[in-house]
Image (cartoon, grey):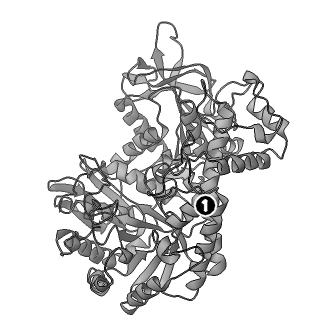
Amino acid sequence: MRGVDYYPEQWPLELMDDDLDRIVELGADTIRIGEFAWHLMEPAHGAYDFSFFDDVIARARSRGLDVVFGTPTATPPAWLATECDIASRFADGTARSFGGRHTACPNQPDYRQACEDVVRRLAAHYRHEAGIVAWQLDNEFGHEGADDCFCDACAVAFRAWLRERFGGDIERLNDTWGTVFWSQQYNDFDEVPLPRATITTHNPALRLDWLRFRSDTLSRFAADQARWVREERPGAVIMHDFPGGGLAKHVDYADVAKSLDVIGYNNYPVWGGQKEPLPPAEIAFGLDHMRGLNRGTPLWITEAIMGAQGHDVTGFLPRPGQAALWSVQALARGATGLCYFRYRQATKGAEQFCYGIIDADNRVGRRYREVRDVFEFARGIEPVLEAPVDAPVAILADYRSRACWEIQQQSILMDVPAEMARWHGLFHARNIMVDIVAAGEDFSGYRLLVVPHMILTDPTVADRLGDFVSAGGTVLVMFRSFAKDEDNNLAFGATLPLLTQEWLGVEVAETESVQSLDEFCLDRCADSWSGPAQARGGVFRDMLTAGKGTEVLYRYRDEFFPDYAALTRRNTGKGRAYYLGCLPDRDLQEAVVDALVADAGIAHVETPEDVEYVRRGEKAFVLNHRSSAVTCDLPGHGAIELAPFGYEIIEAVDAD
């Protein structure tokens, strides 16, 4: 799929033929339409009219262009907002005003019914339209705060969710949450509050269930929309365009992905207010997260960019060739489709400063030519894009644990998604591919697992990790993992880490949260370890006692706690497990990653800094993220000259 995001409803009708002709000349084969056009499809309640899009699709079909059609539920029309109270609400009860997007609450019955009606009518109307190759659900679930709502409909739905979760037994809820604390026992589910602002704080178990409920709200909304489309158009290909930053939102994208046939991703290395683009490793982290959702599902970039972006504040303008490089980076890391946002810069509305392939002057320029070149490149490597991406490493993502850290941050420096990205970046610097995988998914096929601060203990995941190590895998477990039960409570009578001590070989004797990255010294104490003799650490400190057969690699240098381990290593079965009790400095992090890679037997190709090597099947992409030319020496290829923001595709080399 090579496409553009096209909004013909925003332009005079007489421009459409010229637009579509230029889109074909661009090398595109697809247009993505409809996602924000509810009022055009239903200008009054129950008065459906799809004639405008009938015309668009017919004109596209005559030019051989396929269509990705978006359900319009992200932008309900003004008449619906006027007739019914569908607005979502902030935590203080203030309604979100009509005028933006995603301002309706998915738990509001009138909105849900209106969504079902328009989606079913739309899908039924185009039941036999062969030109529609995929259906996009809504737009960017959870984006811009749309994952939170505190309206009365959410209160009703939350209490119903709790009744289902606890089997209608309010005493089971009381016992699970420990509501005897602060005299919070409930006689009925209708007494349970939403976690709005209060004195001190709400019960952590209530808050965790609230965030589980928030995620389930959007996951069920996605699943319902997918079902509505499939029931009206059997065999429909269903996708969704996820925004970046999903690991910090109140929706588990891995759950949403279960309803999809295609993963879409809106890839924005720059946005409003940015002085410079995201670093290459951070862009790769977002791509690897999307690729890890529902592995094996095709990945499309549904919004690639060419120009500067922003709503009220504009950001960095990609330099010539730079945005094209980001597109090729996405193809290298697993994408099979590429769609650019947007065909033409808008002249009206909130996105006037989201610059497109062409500007509002409607003239073909540099960015148009760059997109044309990328499409030509992509068309020439289609067999390569059919090959899977082989990642030997997985970082486990657990929505509930991330929610737990949000509820009780413990250290003001604790940021789980940022820590995941930090460790991912070390593998990226070594050109080692990493999948970001939900902890509940099958991870047995990897060679190395990184477990970042999985504070909630899922017994099944703990057992599977033990089996993974015993079978020959390498695991790094980071501080404050397996410290709470699944309900966000501490475990009585049990030492930490819970359910994992047999294969980790450590106990957490004491623990401390610190508010510094550079709080204490670490001393190497193992001759078999080649890392730095001394290091620094911070953020948190799990003080470890090592069991028999567990090697202590570093201890904390501390006059009060001189005997506690900070980093341990244990051979279990055919594999090896590490426990890291704090956030170490960069030198020790590098040493840890090198040891993990060596233990797992993972070979990799070395390149100069800011040059990315990505293998896909029998080919490899070499990408220069520098603004200057670079020479890259690769085994079997010799010196490869790469222009500023240049890229090449070569035969894959044997890694050392």
Front-lying residue, 177 or 202: 202
Residue at far top of view: 559
The amino acid on which the numbered mark 1 sits, given as a three-letter code, is: Cys
Across and down, in percent, residue 210 comes to 65, 42
Q: Quadrant of residue 100?
A: bottom left
- Crowding around mark 1 (Cα neighbors within 10 Å: few <14, some 14 to 19, many 20+) is few
Q: Quadrant of residue 398?
A: top right
Across and down, in percent, residue 558 comes to 46, 11
Residue 57 in sight from this viewpoint: yes
Identify the secondary structure beneath mark 1: loop
Relative to 577, residue 217 above or below: below
Relative to 56, residue 520 above or below: above
Relative to 617, residue 489 above or below: above
Image quarter in which the N terminus is found: bottom left
Across and down, in percent, residue 521 comes to 40, 17
Residue found 56% across the figure and 38% down from its top: 92
Q: Which residue is mark 1?
A: 84
Residue at far bottom of view: 62
Front-lying residue, 103 or 515: 103
Across and down, in percent, residue 491 comes to 72, 27
Residue found 41% across the figure and 18% down from its top: 519
| Residue 555 as seen in the image, left or right of residue 486 | left
